[in-house]
Image (spheres, coloured by chain):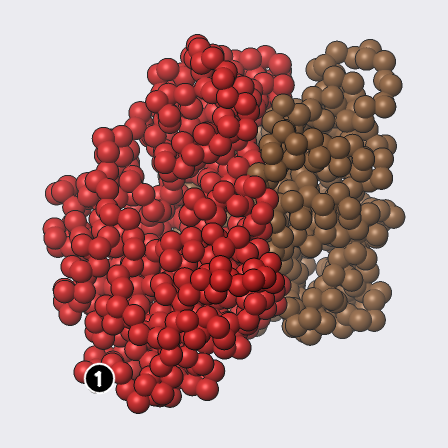
Chain colours: A brown, B red
Amino acid sequence: MFRRQHFTKISHRCFSSESRINSFIKSKLMSAEDIAEKLPEKLTLGASGFTPAGYPKVIPGAYAQRIKNSKNPEDFSINLYTGASTGDELDGVLARTGRLKLKIPYQSHPDLRKFINQGKLDFIDMHLSHVSRYMREGIFPPINVAIVEACDVTSDGRIYLTNSSGMSSTYLALAKDIYVELNEAHPLEMKGLHDIYLPELHTGRPINIDYVDDRIGTPYIRVNPERIKGIILTNKFDSSPGFKKPDDASFKIANHILDFILNEVEHGRIPKKLLPFQSGVGNVANAVLACIAKDNRFKSIEMYTEVIQDSIFDLIDSDKLRFASTTALTFSLEGQKRFFNQLTELKSKFILRPMEISNNPEVIRRIGLITMNTALEADIYGNVNSTHVLGSAMMNGIGGSGDFTRNAYVSMFMTPSIAKGGKISSFVPMVSHCDHNEHSVQIMVSEQGLADLRAKTPKQRAELIIEKCVHPMYKDQLRDYYKQAQRVSFGLHTPHDLQQALSWHVRLQQTGSMHPDYQQTKTKDTEQAAKQDAQTASTKK
Amino acid sequence: MFRRQHFTKISHRCFSSESRINSFIKSKLMSAEDIAEKLPEKLTLGASGFTPAGYPKVIPGAYAQRIKNSKNPEDFSINLYTGASTGDELDGVLARTGRLKLKIPYQSHPDLRKFINQGKLDFIDMHLSHVSRYMREGIFPPINVAIVEACDVTSDGRIYLTNSSGMSSTYLALAKDIYVELNEAHPLEMKGLHDIYLPELHTGRPINIDYVDDRIGTPYIRVNPERIKGIILTNKFDSSPGFKKPDDASFKIANHILDFILNEVEHGRIPKKLLPFQSGVGNVANAVLACIAKDNRFKSIEMYTEVIQDSIFDLIDSDKLRFASTTALTFSLEGQKRFFNQLTELKSKFILRPMEISNNPEVIRRIGLITMNTALEADIYGNVNSTHVLGSAMMNGIGGSGDFTRNAYVSMFMTPSIAKGGKISSFVPMVSHCDHNEHSVQIMVSEQGLADLRAKTPKQRAELIIEKCVHPMYKDQLRDYYKQAQRVSFGLHTPHDLQQALSWHVRLQQTGSMHPDYQQTKTKDTEQAAKQDAQTASTKK
């Protein structure tokens, strides 16, 4: 308790008006090119950033240029550790050097994806809550350099981050040399938004977050100032893609979800004041918040999540956001400007936490969250594939979806029922890769309807998913599979026909569609088809 | 803090020498047959017991007899909710009435398994940590009767359980009518072993267990004594199967595990005093404890687990057991006698907790466990099937393995590399059912060796598993699959040949073996073969 009050006080003190370029910063100022020259050729870089938010935007480009100018670019090799995916100025720029050898722990950049699936780049796709510990235990190649974006640095080594917290505290703790991009696009009033707390290993000490707005840490990351080897000044907004209004299918999914939640409240399984929400990135998640904002039946919302997008403004405008805990503010350009302009009033409604806290299963389980994540595909028994197209091609990665789903109070997965104009059904006999299994997936939603899978046998689940979620053009086909599976397996607990279980995927590989009536002339070779499928699934997500 | 001290005091007070048959018990005494007559024909029964430990042993048989004697047995239907599987006197007896319609949340009884896979009995296979909440939220058909085994009952409604805690506290809270089997085989000194705490829903309140021996509850379950409708006296030991000495393969697996743990200690990833262990039921888990007992490099062990078996006596005899938290003491007859005889000295080393606490992800994550669970099969990328033979036939269920694995500090899965004399390889191209995915499975062990899958790409994992874990008779075959998968998927992130991914299982269905050289004449029809496979996998587990 003392701890919490103590740090709350510090946080309030941080509304400071000191000049940004203090004498310490001045003494460390360098050019991006000079820093690029000082970075090692074998670079293991821990960078700030989680999604395209709060990542270094200039030094990576200068380093890429150094590689390009080098007579021996093959002397360079880069391991890149970030919070999750970041912006093109970091993920993309370094990938395109061709010298990126290892990326951890998430990616969603087309260039990275290409190299990963070509086998040219090692990617470790992991639960985000595991990353910090693995780093600190030395399971990964050790970090030699950390580069973080900050809005302020003090002479005693306090670094104030910008739009994301991500893995920065761990990387700054571990790196030999630290470089800072001091980004003047961020108001100094950002100071105080972050709550930095790095749990000790092996202590069994609880993480004392019982409510989404509990503060247990400091608003800065403290490092030995001597380890800060250089600072550059920048003035750049995060290059988040513009915010796309959710489509019709997303709104249908969102409405199914809201009806379900209200029904749970009515039955006393969710309290009237609701439970905090976690929502993945994307259209549907945004549609849910937009619908809540408009719906009179919802009064006040809390979020305990990893990414906040522009859709939060709908809640703010309708005065329904009580509090949002996140590790990243991933706003469009307009969203960033609005957030900075309204920072004084909005600050009391947000906390930015390190990824190991935003995604911490202990806290997630204790608080009790309604989680909403996107499925790439799901099967009739409720198993979910979040990561792999056709079982082999990495799409984005599991990210935090496992941390949240497995420990949720109510775990939901959502997906439009078809993709690629109907050539792909999101509901298949058996998933080609399983990231979330039947035991952990409680609610499945498509624009067709919502299936409550809790307390159901596999057969009840299959019937419910086919009935509620599957697109009409695939319903009979999936019913036929299910009947055939019951026939060949003589009933059993979870009927499957193992000779046909993956046949929809094979048909997609061979004909370009999961639907048998699809009459595409196969003009492309299989490789091209697979690439196209991967691309489509990407835009779908 | 106040709470914890308060209850510790109560617990110490409980070493009482009062006569077991107090006037309250006397006033409630009935025969089992009388109770059986009073039970409803539509019975939804919440029973004590977790594994064959602490379950009611007499009333279920009397109720089964009533059904047998009935002119209209089809008027009866039973939903049976337990902690996990229990003994034949409960699970078996009620299954054989043919009137059991629903079983939750785990089973390992051959009669139950048969009915489940014949589609005659609904079985909901779920994470054990989810059960209490689902029950209390009314997601399952509501309980009308609770029957628990106790070693004492007081006139003010305190019920002291016996060899397991399981789901008893939840079922007693929810049932309309309560019946007690007062089992005089258990010494009254059992009182004080249990620590009963039922977390409130929707509060975000932490479960204050930071160390395996923390007490946060009461040594009894308190109910309104008026709800206790009848008590019978019994004097029966749990009918646990005799303790089988681990086989050679189990000792080999155990030794790989101990070497791994000591290497982790050496590298500072596990502290010198170690971390508490969770271990599943079975040979390998027992072999690990036996090896620790003999190995001078291990000094003192803590357990935070769901089942304790006779192997704990190896640790006790070598003075290496510091403390064990569990929800069940599943001893052989000899083990039960020994435990009761030594209860005074052993009591300070054990806590029996409700299943929602023993398996609580918040606590598991906080404490940081080394978890060891058994795989039915695993694939080259580290996905684990714990539940389904050939993707369809339910073996036992996921039990607590998901609660522990997903939140472990180090999660291990172990399996002998082959089963059925080599007709089955435990390592396959793709699992036919996925209960624990590549993101959550960190260590894979067979008698052949141990694969550390942490921080590895899928391709690195495949090579490691084939190299370290696979039986020599299947190594080339699995290498061939992996090469073929790389060829047809053009590399990609997680190479699979979807036309062949399940071909090993199909071959087993068709020929009786996964090995192509196996020359069995196919005399049996497919149904028989599937049955035989299920049976074999059962004994394997």
Number of disc labels: 1
- Residue B100's place in the image compared with A263, above or below, is above
Graded by Cα atoms within 10 Å as few (under 14), some (14 to 19) or many (20 or more), the crowding at tag 1 reads few
- Residue B475's place in the image compared with B272, above or below, is above
- Note whether residue A276 is visible: yes
Is B344 displayed left or right of B199 in the figure? left
Query: Helix or strand or loop: what does disc 1 sit on?
Result: loop
Split into 4 quadrants, where in the image is the N terminus of chain A?
bottom left
A443 or A230, which is in the foreground?
A: A443
Query: x, y (%) of residue B290?
Result: 19, 43
B332 or A145, which is in the foreground?
A: B332
Determine the residue positioned at 77% across, 27% down.
Answer: A514
- Note whether residue B261 is visible: no
Determine the residue positioned at 75% across, 11% down.
Answer: A525
A173 or A86, which is in the foreground?
A: A86
B278 or B275, which is in the foreground?
A: B278
Is B229 displayed left or right of B324 in the figure? right
Query: x, y (%) of residue B338?
Result: 16, 59
Is B453 displayed left or right of B330 in the figure? right
